[in-house]
Image: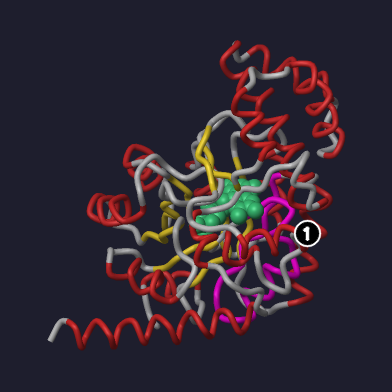
Amino acid sequence: MKTRITKLFGIEHPIILSGMSWISVPRLVAAVSNAGGLGILATGVMTADETRAAIKEIRSLTKKPFAANITLYFPGAERNAQVLIDEKVPVINYALGKGDWLAKKVHAYGGKVVATVTTHKHALAAERDGADALIVTGYEAAGHGGAITSLVLIPSIAEAVKIPIIAAGGIADGRGLAAALALGADGVSMGSRFMNTIESPVHENMKKLSIAKTIYDTVYTPKIDGLPARFMKSKKVLKVMSRPLNLITAAFNSREIAKSLGYPWIKIALAILLQGYGRAKKMATMANGFKAFRVGTMDGDNAHGVLPLGQVTGLIHDTPKVADLVKRLVKEAREAQKDLNAKMK
Ligand SMILES: Cc1cc2nc3c(=O)[nH]c(=O)nc-3n(C[C@H](O)[C@H](O)[C@H](O)COP(=O)(O)O)c2cc1C
């Protein structure tokens, strides 16, 4: 398959591993890149030193292009961005912030920049700011998808911008890949599907649950981490959704996060408070959400933790090796193309 995305990144298949905190780690990133796609390292919960070490590890596992993500909204993002620039990471994916400065620095060493967006406003702004491509995330997605379904969002944003777009949200097989290309995307990015692979470090409980759950077993809510996002439906998630924000728990959780990111907590707390009550409340919710993500993804504890999960969980029935999955996606997409040709004669 040859699309504007395979050309832009120098990869074989237009298939991308989404940046998922604690999950898109060097082993999984390298497995996707080695299989001919593009792995994105998630740096949101890493210190600058951990990010540098992770890039070194990826380079020891693959000679193929790879990417790393930066969530500009999070504390510590600039420090990690600087590491990615110093290390000349081939592709940098950013979200939730303005990326003009990043694009300039990355283009200076010949790298590419991809912005993750969920609306036209942000898609057009990212294009103006110099992004080379967009990841456009629909309502079906795990985590922070937009309010509009991929079926409508992808063609609509494809019409509005000139740069290539990568569809995210609702894709788990080759039919989804072929459909995304038909809708005007030049590639796909998958989270839930790659989360359930042999190389994924997510806890085995969550791999089993993602097979057992159906398309009806997720919820979309801003109550878990402060921004509208999709999670596996569980007693814990429904409890958090029904209760007001617990500020005391948030204070403890944000201390834990600040410590793991190597930041003085008081400095982060003061900086956030200075930005006003709205931002402080969002960050407090995010602190609670992040603690719950870690417990869900790494400890596999569904009673105390939460798991971002897309509606495609209902299309996931196995735990394959990444290389086999990528081959299967390409084969299925070609079969879908043949079926379509036959139907549309
Ligand atoms: C377990 C899990 C963890 C995720 N963590 C993050 C994250 O830390 N940051 C982020 O921007 N997106 C995160 N996502 C969302 C993905 O990046 C991606 O947008 C989404 O999975 C695409 O939808 P899909 O699941 O239907 O493929 C996560 C997704 C999953 C399944």
Helix or strand or loop: what does disc 1 sit on?
loop
Give the x, y percent position of residue 166. Answer: 42, 61
- What residue sits 72% from the left and 66% below the top? 200
What kind of colouring is applied to the model shown? secondary structure
Q: Is residue 106 visible?
A: no
Q: Is residue 218 above or below residue 207?
A: above
In depth, the one of 269 and 241 nearer the eye is 241
Give the x, y percent position of residue 171. Answer: 45, 64
Instruction: From the viewer's perspective, tell me whether residue 326 is left or right of residue 305.
Output: left
In depth, the one of 83 and 14 nearer the eye is 14
Displayed quadrant of residue 163: bottom left
Would residue 142 be counted in the magenta stretch? no
Amino acid at pointer 1: His
Instruction: From the viewer's perspective, tell me whether residue 29 is left or right of residue 316.
Output: right
Displayed quadrant of residue 117: top left
Give the x, y percent position of residue 224. Answer: 62, 32
- What residue sits 49% from the left and 54% below the top? 311
- What residue sits 50% from the left and 39% below the top? 220
Instruction: Bin the neighbour count of mark 1 within 10 Å (Cα to Cα): few under 14, some 14-19, many 20 and up.
Output: some
Displayed quadrant of residue 76: top right
Give the x, y percent position of residue 308. Answer: 61, 48
Q: Is residue 37 above or below residue 126?
A: below
Q: Badge 1 is on which residue?
A: 203
Would residue 34 be counted in the magenta stretch? yes
Instruction: From the viewer's perspective, tell me whether residue 224 is left or right of residue 217.
Output: right
Region of the chain picked out in magenta, as a range: 20-44
Q: Is residue 305 above or below residue 198?
A: above
In depth, the one of 215 and 51 nearer the eye is 215
Q: Which quadrant would the N terminus be assigned to in this image?
A: bottom left
Q: Is residue 337 visible?
A: yes
